[in-house]
Image (cartoon, rainbow, N blue to C red):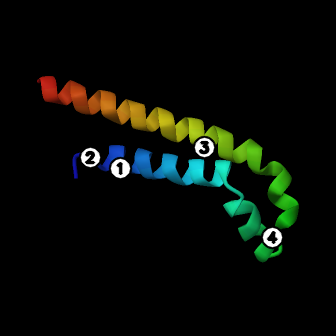
Amino acid sequence: MKNKLLVGGILGTAIAALCCFTPLLVILLGFVGLSALTGYLDYVLLPALVFFVALTLYALWRHKKCEKI
């Protein structure tokens, strides 16, 4: 359970990257009838991707710092 932050960061990064770089989310939104929201995806997905990459890097840094002690 020590690596919960790292696992969360990696999973969040993978999901955000999958939704950013593939039309998966656009197809899903069109399927459920919310295709009007596709214009706003960049405002949500890119900051989410940056956040999760930063979270992953922070978790790695914290993990390495704890190993040195």
Question: Mark 4, mark 1: which one is toward the viewer?
Answer: 4
Label 4 Cα neighbours within 10 Å, binned few <14 / some 14-19 / many ≥20: few
Give whichever of 28, 68 is nearer the camera: 28
Badge 2 or badge 4: first in the primary sequence: 2
Residue shown at 66% from the left, 48% from the top:
21
Q: Secondary structure at mark 2?
A: loop
Residue 68, x across and y down, in percent: 14, 23
Give whichever of 27, 56 is nearer the camera: 27
Q: Secondary structure at mark 4?
A: helix
Question: Mark 2, mark 4: which one is toward the viewer?
Answer: 4
Residue shown at 58% from the left, 35% from the top:
50
Q: Which residue is mark 3?
A: 48
Distance, label 4 to label 1, CA atoms, is 30 Å
Badge 4 or badge 1: first in the primary sequence: 1
Give whichever of 51, 20 is nearer the camera: 20
Q: Is residue 60 above or below residue 23?
A: above
Distance, label 3 to label 1, CA atoms, is 16 Å
Left or right of 10 in this view: 46:
right
Left or right of 48 in this view: 5:
left
> Which label is found at residue 30?
4
Q: Secondary structure at mark 3?
A: helix
Q: On the image, which quarter does residue 42 sit in? A: top right
